[in-house]
Image (cartoon, grey):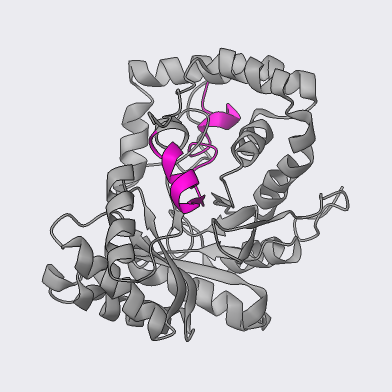
Amino acid sequence: MSSPTEAPKDLPKMEYRFLGRSGLQVSCISLGGWLTYGGHVENEKTFSCMKAAYDAGINFFDCAEGYAGGESEKVMGEAIKRYGWKRNDYVISTKINWGAANGDNPVNNGGLSRKHLVEGTKASLERLGLDYVDLLYAHRPDRNTPMEEVVRGFNFLIDQGKCFYWGTSEWNADEIERAHHVATRLNLVGPIMEQPQYNMLVRERCEKEYSLLYENYGLGLTPFSPLKSGILTGKYNDGIPKDSRFGVNSDDNYVKSMQERFQTEDWQQEAKKVDDLKPIADKLGTSRGRLAMAWVLKNPHVASAITGASRPEQIWDSLMAIELLPKLTDEVMKEIDEALGNKPTPLTRRF
């Protein structure tokens, strides 16, 4: 039995994938700081998780200016400095839109104005202790800022060497399409990646709404919440465990919303689907959590699935999903679709 600080010897070899229509390769599983680093997880545990991920072949780390009011970026930057990783050996991203906590007046510390894109990115880099990030996301659309200003702002940051690629998070297909049209008209770079929620229970956007964007623009996905905040592991089906993040009193709006959700009829329907996945996982000799992670990775448009972890063991468990991929045959995928009953019909060209 491996100690908590020693990785299992049977971890699968990391798989690296190209990010959209680019030459950049990222680990198919990445580590994110949402709800954890700089907030709910103490720094030493964050360092342990990042080192465990890096040592296992994960080269992509994701954060945002809005995570824990900028603290997530700080602690990730401290980990990078502590372990002395070479800058060319890892890929790091951050996201700009919600930076109100990082200024005294919230008026221009949010959104995607040229001012906030430039100043917010500069502040993020200072917290990370880096000269540039590899990936920079628009952390949700800003419908109060003209699309031309957004596209020009990201391209200015690319030209200044503050990032290499830009993308979006939870934009709809029309907004991504318009960004590309503007970029083409101005002879600028459009968004190459999107960071949506994508998992067995949330499929419509990635499998239907975006379907033409993959063909037209080579859009790559770096989805978050592949396990739907742990719901797809089945650990919440019999109630909220007291040692889970949703089992304690918290002022965090997301935690409170999830606690309320567990009381709804929608949750009961989701729990039934998670129960229906257990026989499939058992037949494959795996857990529902690993099956859910492998299912996300089976999508050819997914470059990297962003997972969260408060302990190294959680990272290692997620990585075991890689060896499950060959077992997800067409027959198994059909069986999963029948259990879930939510497969969208992709959009197709009408000409």
> Camera-side residue: 325 or 209?
209
Q: Quadrant of residue 349?
A: top left
Q: Is residue 125 left or right of residue 293?
A: left
Q: Is residue 329 left or right of residue 228?
A: right
Total tally of numbered discs in the picture: 0
Residue range highlighted in magenta: 209-237
Q: Is residue 117 left or right of residue 9?
A: left
Residue 41 in view (yes/no): yes
- In the image, residue 173 sits, relative to residue 31, either above or below, namely above
- In the image, residue 167 sits, relative to residue 289, either above or below, namely below
Q: Tell me if residue 159 is in the magenta stretch.
A: no
Residue 80: x and y in percent read: 59, 77
> Camera-side residue: 237 or 251?
237
Q: Residue at x 47, y 81 (%)?
A: 132
> Camera-side residue: 119 or 345?
345
> Camera-side residue: 91 or 234?
91
Q: Residue at x 28, y 70 (%)?
A: 186
Residue 144: x and y in percent read: 13, 58
Q: Quadrant of the C terminus?
A: top left
Q: Residue at x 81, y 54 (%)?
A: 13
Residue 101: x and y in percent read: 25, 69
Q: Residue at x 21, y 57 (%)?
A: 142
Q: Quadrant of residue 269?
A: top left
